[in-house]
Image: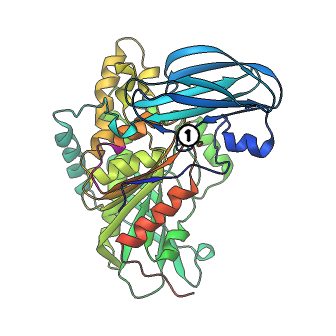
Amino acid sequence: MKRWFLAPVAACLLAFTLPTLAQFQKEGGPVKARCERESALYKVGEDITFLVESNADADLFYTLSEDGFKVISKGIVKVEKGKPASIKSKLDKPGFLQLKVGTAKQTVLAAAAVDPTKIEPTAKMPADFDAFWDAGRKELAKIPLDAKVERVAKHSDDRLDCYKVSLANIEGKRVHGWLCVPKGKGPFPAILTVPGAGVSPINPDKNHCYLGAITLNIIIHDIPVDETADFYKKMNAGPLANYRDIGMAERDKSYYRGVILGCVRAIDYLFSRDDFNKKDMAVTGGSQGGALTLITSGLDQRVVLAAPNIAAMCDHSGMAFDRVSGWPHWLQRAKGDNKAKVLETSAYFDAVNFARKFKGKSVHGVGFIDTVCAPTTVYSAFNVHPEPKVMINSPLMAHAQDPAWNKARQQLFKDNMAMQPPAK
């Protein structure tokens, strides 16, 4: 597997409010920004040139920063209609140089990666990290699977059978998900998909099932996978409001302790099935799901393939070292004396520390202008992952999914799993 596959984004993929260059090219927006170098890859100390365009003569405000966190300089750039203006700078250490430029009404981003594979994480491994998670897994192992499986006709077809699945987890909670099984003799490989942040329904992963794998797509909350929109809205405003912060200062009470062990429980279930080949186990997801991909594959050595995209929960400790932290930015919301405890607790839930323990192959994705899961933090985890690994760089992408990453993920599965596609 190749070490690098550099893939600039050529289409609008933005999922949040800050627009990409490609979006403005499509919509004809007044301000555009990009690196002079298409790959947006540079070396430490190398001159970096950003090009800024406007559809009218304008004086634009700009800020250069270390990945949106630490301001390096501010200024005004004069832009003539139809003529790119340049803003130059450099970084004297590995990281991301971010440009924010525009007017009071419109701001766009561009970013340059500076020796990103040399970024070192700030996350430190607690001395009792393994003991903490070993205890959790032992607690989980004492709980019977109690699998409840119900075939759902409307999601099944002539190539696969789809089921709603519910599994017993710690603390009386349950794991809920969709299981898809290819029609055929088997045994098949298996792919676990873990979700992004939020409280919402999920859909069966039919696409990977059509490729020839058993798929299990889980929700991280102890709620059904297919309720009404109003149900999820009430849960999000009620008992699951700000679930990300529950127990952020107490490792035994962290919401993510049950979430992570729930992911292990999902793998337990897949390994209990006779139609799984018991060797080709993959995990994938984006954002929070990217974090859970890194975490689950590092915690459970049965996982041999990992495909995280724009991974969250990487380098929680960044802010303690004057650097950007990963989502959910716990230190940013910690108050007073609680900050030290939050920092200590975060290490037990830092995807970087789990990534250090993974033993398989992986494909990662990163957006250079991602302000949710900052690319510095994504690379912090990537750089401690073992070889062979591939990073799909998307210089013009914010918090989204690059089709090039999806293609590389699919190739990872095809190349390394005994797929058995169902007959059409």
2 or 293: nearer the eye?
Answer: 2
Question: Is residue 386 covered in magenta?
Answer: yes
Q: Residue at the spot x=56%, y=52% of the render? A: 402
Does the magenta-highlighted stretch encompass residue 36?
no
Q: Position of residue 306 (x, y in %)?
A: 37, 57
Image coordinates of residue 252 in percent, x first then y, are 29, 35
Q: Secondary structure at mark 1?
A: loop
Q: Name the one closer to the observer, 15 or 190.
A: 15
Residue 89 placement (x, y as % from top left):
52, 23
Q: Which residue is mark 1?
A: 37
**Which amino acid type corresponds to the residue marked 1 in the rendered image?**
Arg
Would you say residue 248 is visible in this rendering? no
- Residue lying at 58% horizontally and 26% vertically, measured from the top left: 99
Q: Residue at x 51, y 51 (%)?
A: 223
Q: Determine which quarter of the picture holds residue 398.
A: top right
* Quarter of the figure with the C terminus: bottom right
